[in-house]
Image (cartoon, grey):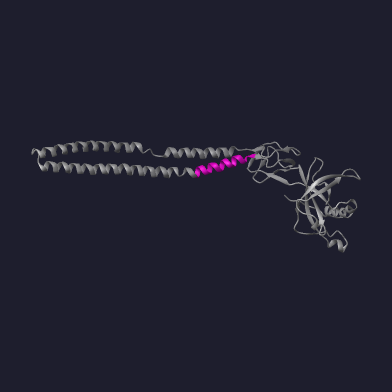
Amino acid sequence: MKFQFTGFVIVTVLFASCSNKENGHDASGTFEADEVIVSASANGKILSFNVDEGSVLAKDSIVGVVDPTNLSLQKQQVEASIQALKQQTINVQPQVLLLNQQLAVQQSQMNSLLHEKARLENLIKQDAATGKQLDDMNAQIEVLKKQMSVTQQQINVQKNNISTQNRSILSQGKPLQKQAAQIEDLLMKTNIRNPVNGTVLAKYAEAGEITSTGKAMYKIADLSYLNLRAYITGTQLPKIKLGQQVSVFTDDGKESFKQYAGTIIWISDKAEFTPKTIQTKEERANLVYAIKVKVKNDGYLKIGMYGEVGF
């Protein structure tokens, strides 16, 4: 927010300060407001823009829309890519199922061999079988154990390989999800959202125009309170402080004033020289300090209106 003061305004203020002494007023200046310039947050054609100069807008109300078609298509494309990743993953179950069936057959064979081993051990006790038969049976059991171990390892390797491949595929989904979130954020910005409660002071765009990010669309200010920017001398500076209650006066006809209650909300920490259009050397050497007085607006105060302060 920038405020400009011409030499004429400051001269008027200073000359008025001289006559203020007769009226009992200590300083004078003009009213201003905290103005906000609302800019576009998206690129594209303005589909709707419900803003008029002088209209009162509520904070966070949506006052217009910038065409979101392109962004919507981008989001749909990213979401389709995320779905495609899920279809690229490999199902481990069919391959592992075959190995599990093979392991089950081997386990059945192992059960039969163990049963046969127990039978041979009983026969040996009865001298009905030889030790070589038992040794051969133990050898078969050891071979089958190794085969079962290999099958189990194949199952584990298959699971790990497919799991690794699937993680690699699905890991691409996180960047895509972030991209979708970014596009969603841009889509939300296609809604032109009013940032503050206030009155529209100026309108810079119309529906149907092409706008771009950062381009000014309208200016708004809360006029329920205005700030009187006035100037005081160095001798007056020690007499005031932040939060001090003061009286503010505006013209009410040719010879009368309208009085308001005001609060000092800002005092400049830097002195300013009076303009050189003041011809006397003494007056040119004077330093003044800017202050702001907050005043509740009853509907009559306007930006740029002249006012005076009484401490």
Residue at 35% from the left image edge and 42% from the top image edge: 159
Residue at 52% from the left image edge and 39% from the top image edge: 77
Residue at 42% from the left image edge and 39% from the top image edge: 88
Q: How many marks?
A: 0
Residue at 47% from the left image edge and 42% from the top image edge: 173
Whether the magenta-drawn stretch holds residue 167 is answered as no
| Residue placed most toward the observer, 264 or 278 | 264
In magenta, the rendered stretch is 175-191
| Residue placed most toward the observer, 143 or 79 | 143
Predominant secondary structure, magenta span:
helix
| Residue placed most toward the observer, 81 or 208 | 81
Residue 224 against residue 231 in the figure, above or below? above
Q: Position of residue 108 (x, y in %)?
A: 23, 35
Q: Position of residue 96 (x, y in %)?
A: 32, 38
Would residue 88 appear left or right of 204 to someone viewing this image?
left
Q: Position of residue 183 (x, y in %)?
A: 56, 42
Q: Which corner quadrant of the image does residue 121 belong to?
A: top left
Q: Position of residue 66 (x, y in %)?
A: 64, 39
